[in-house]
Amino acid sequence: PASTESHPIVAWHCLRDPASTMPAKKAKGGGVAAGAEPSAAERSKAADLLKKLNALCGTHLITIAVPAGGDLAKAADWLASELTTASAMKSADAKRVLTDALAGAKEKLKSYKLPPPTGLLLFFGEAQESTGKGKAQKIAIDMVPFKPLRTSLTSLGTNFELSALSELAEDNGKANPKEEASLAAFFDEISRGTGKTAYGTRDTLQALQAAAVTTLIVSEDLTLRRLHVCGKQSGEQKDLYVSPAEEKSGKALRPEGEEELECLESGSFVDWIRDNSWVFGVELELVAGSGENAKKFKEGYGGIGASLRYRMDFEPEEYDY
């Protein structure tokens, strides 16, 4: 059998607070109201998880999708039935893998005293990359969706059943009312000349580091790269934000008149800030739409900007990206 890492790749991946058991808003005639439109950031998280889980396979992978307004008891009954079947398996290794996954999902399901208003998604099992590379990993994911889930399913197979997650990652291509509201407020603040906005890479990141940002707005297709570096002599660590061309040339690691730097980690700024915006205490709005305001933001303001807590004055610069 494949060796197993002791830690899961995702032990807790929740698109909405799982502790929230407040009653769902009711639509006219009963049922759960759709509520606020999902943001691009929320859809992006779902799409990212979809991509990761789609690349995994195993022998006994469990997927449970409880729709909005659904009954957790049905999923619990299914797990109990599968545990009974698993107890009769002859292969000790296969029995361990399956019972561990079923028991883990059962315990997590029991932790929800009330059905979450928008539904629930569970992914449990021991899996590895479908390419056959890497060690097996224990997957233990529970998600409260950011919008009411329609799909209802229980699945046990060699792959995770991802139709419910695909439902969350869907984007109909229309301008998102949360997105449009943030951009409208951003442009209005600029037009009033309050100084409580920043845009372009240099000024926005300066404001972010100064803890002046309330809402950070980033185009989902921004090509900016984040490099986590350290001085080869001093060992001092810091982040650099560069264009793909600058990263490729390596010029940023050889600043004129300063010590040479070593790159410890590099990646997309968009991916990094999506996972780390909470560190800065900001609301993140990822712009994925193709509306007039989205196009204006990307082409005229560099695809990155922020609404600020207080006025900041920035020095003009000739070049930005």
Image (spheres, helix red, strand yellow):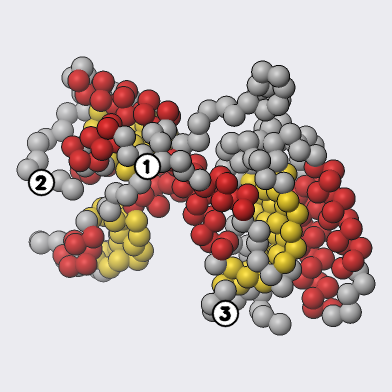
Task: Determine the residue positioned at 18% across, 61% down.
Answer: 246
Looking at the image, is mark 2 or mark 3 earlier in the sequence?
3
Which label number is shown at residue 132? Answer: 3
Type of amino acid at the residue the image marks with label 3: Gly
Q: Is residue 63 left or right of residue 100?
A: left
**Mark on residue 319?**
2
Q: Is residue 181 above or below residue 124?
A: above
Q: Amino acid at mark 1?
A: Ala
* Nearest to N terminus: mark 1 or mark 2: 1
Q: Are marks 1 and 2 in contact (CB under 8 Å)?
A: no
Query: As rendered, which of 163 and 119 lies closer to the eye?
Result: 163
Residue drawn at (49%, 54%) of the image: 48
Q: Is residue 120 visible?
A: no
Tag shown at residue 40:
none
Name the residue: 84% across, 46% down: 74
Identify the residue position indicated by label 1 in the image.
288
Dot in front, 1 or 3:
1
Please, what is the three-letter code of the amino acid marked with disc 2? Answer: Tyr
* SS under mark 3: loop
Element on which disc 1 rests:
loop
Q: CA distance from mark 1 to mark 2?
A: 25 Å
